[in-house]
Image (cartoon, rainbow, N blue to C red):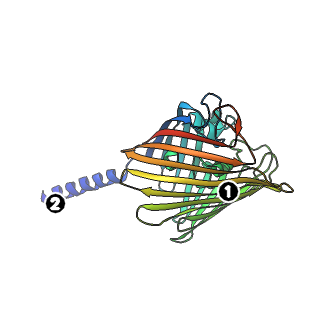
C-alpha cells in the first residue's frame, strides 16, 4: 500500500510539473498613447508642424494603439503587431498591408542557440528611435528617424557571434515597400553589434523612390548609475544627394519614477554642386514620470533652420524656427 501511495504521489508531482512546464505560449502586449500639443511661436490653427514623423497635430490628439500577439514555440514562433491611430497610420502608410493596420507580421525560426531566421515584415534595424512611443524617451521623433525606413518586408538572419558581438544580415523589398515589390529590385541590410553599440548598413538602387545607401551608428553609454548618453549618427546618399545628421540623448534619472532627457540633433541635406542647403538644429527637452505602467511626458521642443523658412510665426509671417509644448500619456501592457 505504501508503495502504491508513493508511486501515486510521484505521478501526481510529475503531472503538476509537466503542467507548469506546458504554460500557454501565446502572449499579448501593446500600448496606447494620446497627447496635447500647443505651439509657442505659431498659431495652433494654421496646420504648421515640425515636419518630422508623428505628433504633428495641435490640441488633443490620439497617438496610436497597438496590440502585439506573440506565439513562441520551442524552436519557432510568430508575431503579429496591429496598430491604429494617426501615429500608426504614419508608420504603415495607407498603401501598406491590410489598409495600414499591420505594423509587424513575421515568423521566426531559432535554428540554433546563436542563429535566428526571421521572415515577414519587421521594424527597421536603423536608427536610435522606434515607432512605438513607449520605447522612446522623447515623445516627438527626430529628423534622422523620420528620414530612414520604418519597416522592412523580407528575411533576415541574426547571429550571436559571442557574448559581445552580434551580426545581422537581411534581404528585403526596397525602402518602404512593405507590401509587394513590383520593380523586381531588392535591398540589402547589415548590422554589426558590439556591447550595445551598432553599426548599421542599408542599400537599394535608389531608383523607383528608393533610399539608396545609408550608414548609421546607434549606441549609448551608462556614464553613471543615473546618467545615460545615447548617440545616433547617419549619412545617406542617393545618386549624389541625400541627408546627414547626428543626435545626442543625455538622460538623467532623478528618482525611481522620474527622469529628464534632452535630444540635441543637427540634421541637413547635401547634393552635388549645391552649397548652403538647409540644415536644422532641434532641441527637445522631455520629462518622464512613471506610475505603474503609465508614463507621463511633458516636452518642450525648439527647431531652428538655416537657409530655409518652413514655419510661420504668430503674425502669419514665414520664419525659420518653431517651438511647441507637448504633454503625452503612454500606457503599456
Closer to viewer: mark 1 or mark 2 = 1
Q: Position of residue 245 (x, y in %)?
A: 67, 56
Q: Residue at x 44, y 45 (%)?
A: 27
Label 2 sits on a secondary structure element that is helix
Q: Is residue 317 left or right of residue 223?
A: right
The foreground one among 212 and 330 is: 330
Q: Residues within 10 Å of mark 2 (few under 14, many from 20)?
A: few
Between disc 1 and disc 2, whose residue precedes?
A: 2
Q: Residues within 10 Å of mark 1 (few under 14, many from 20)?
A: many
Q: Residue at x 39, y 55 (%)?
A: 254
Q: Is residue 233 above or below residue 184?
A: below
Q: Is residue 228 left or right of residue 290?
A: right
Q: Label 1 belongs to which residue?
A: 245
The foreground one among 301 and 297 is: 301
Label 1 sits on a secondary structure element that is strand
Q: Label 2 belongs to which residue?
A: 3
Q: Is residue 160 above or below residue 121?
A: below
Q: Which quadrant of the view contains residue 38?
A: top right
The foreground one among 10 and 266 is: 266
Q: CA distance from mark 1 to mark 2?
A: 75 Å
Q: Quadrant of the N terminus?
A: bottom left
Res 276 seen here: yes
Q: Is residue 58 above or below residue 169?
A: above
Q: Which quadrant of the view contains residue 115?
A: bottom right
Amino acid at each position: 500500500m505504501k508503495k502504491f501511495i508513493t508511486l501515486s504521489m510521484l505521478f501526481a508531482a510529475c503531472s503538476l510539473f509537466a503542467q507548469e512546464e506546458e504554460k500557454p505560449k501565446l502572449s499579448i502586449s501593446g500600448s496606447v498613447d494620446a497627447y496635447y500639443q500647443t505651439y509657442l511661436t505659431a498659431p495652433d490653427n494654421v496646420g504648421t508642424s515640425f515636419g518630422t514623423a508623428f505628433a504633428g497635430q495641435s490640441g488633443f490628439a490620439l497617438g496610436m494603439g497597438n496590440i502585439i500577439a506573440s506565439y513562441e514555440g520551442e524552436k519557432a514562433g510568430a508575431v503579429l503587431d496591429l496598430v491604429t491611430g494617426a501615429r500608426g497610420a504614419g508608420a504603415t502608410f495607407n498603401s501598406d498591408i491590410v489598409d495600414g493596420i499591420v505594423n509587424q507580421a513575421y515568423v521566426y525560426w531559432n535554428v540554433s542557440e546563436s542563429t535566428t531566421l526571421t521572415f515577414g515584415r519587421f521594424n527597421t534595424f536603423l536608427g536610435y528611435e522606434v515607432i512605438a512611443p513607449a520605447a522612446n524617451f522623447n515623445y516627438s521623433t527626430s529628423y534622422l528617424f523620420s528620414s530612414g525606413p520604418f519597416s522592412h518586408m523580407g528575411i533576415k538572419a541574426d547571429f550571436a557571434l559571442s557574448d559581445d558581438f552580434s551580426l545581422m544580415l537581411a534581404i528585403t523589398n526596397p525602402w518602404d515597400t512593405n507590401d509587394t515589390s513590383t520593380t523586381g529590385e531588392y535591398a540589402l541590410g547589415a548590422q554589426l553589434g558590439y556591447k550595445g553599440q551598432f553599426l548599421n548598413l542599408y542599400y537599394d538602387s535608389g531608383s523607383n523612390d528608393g533610399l539608396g545607401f545609408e550608414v548609421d551608428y546607434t549606441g549609448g553609454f551608462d556614464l553613471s548609475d543615473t546618467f545615460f548618453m545615447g548617440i545616433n549618427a547617419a549619412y545617406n546618399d542617393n545618386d549624389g544627394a541625400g541627408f546627414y545628421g547626428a543626435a545626442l540623448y543625455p538622460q538623467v534619472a532623478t528618482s525611481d519614477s522620474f527622469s529628464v532627457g534632452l535630444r540635441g540633433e543637427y540634421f541637413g541635406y547635401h547634393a552635388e554642386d549645391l552649397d548652403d542647403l538647409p540644415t536644422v538644429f532641434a532641441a527637445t527637452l522631455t520629462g518622464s514620470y512613471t506610475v505603474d505602467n503609465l508614463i507621463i511626458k511633458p516636452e518642450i521642443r525648439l527647431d531652428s533652420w538655416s537657409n530655409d523658412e518652413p514655419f510661420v510665426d504668430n503674425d502669419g509671417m514665414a520664419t525659420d524656427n518653431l517651438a511647441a509644448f507637448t504633454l503625452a500619456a503612454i500606457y503599456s501592457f
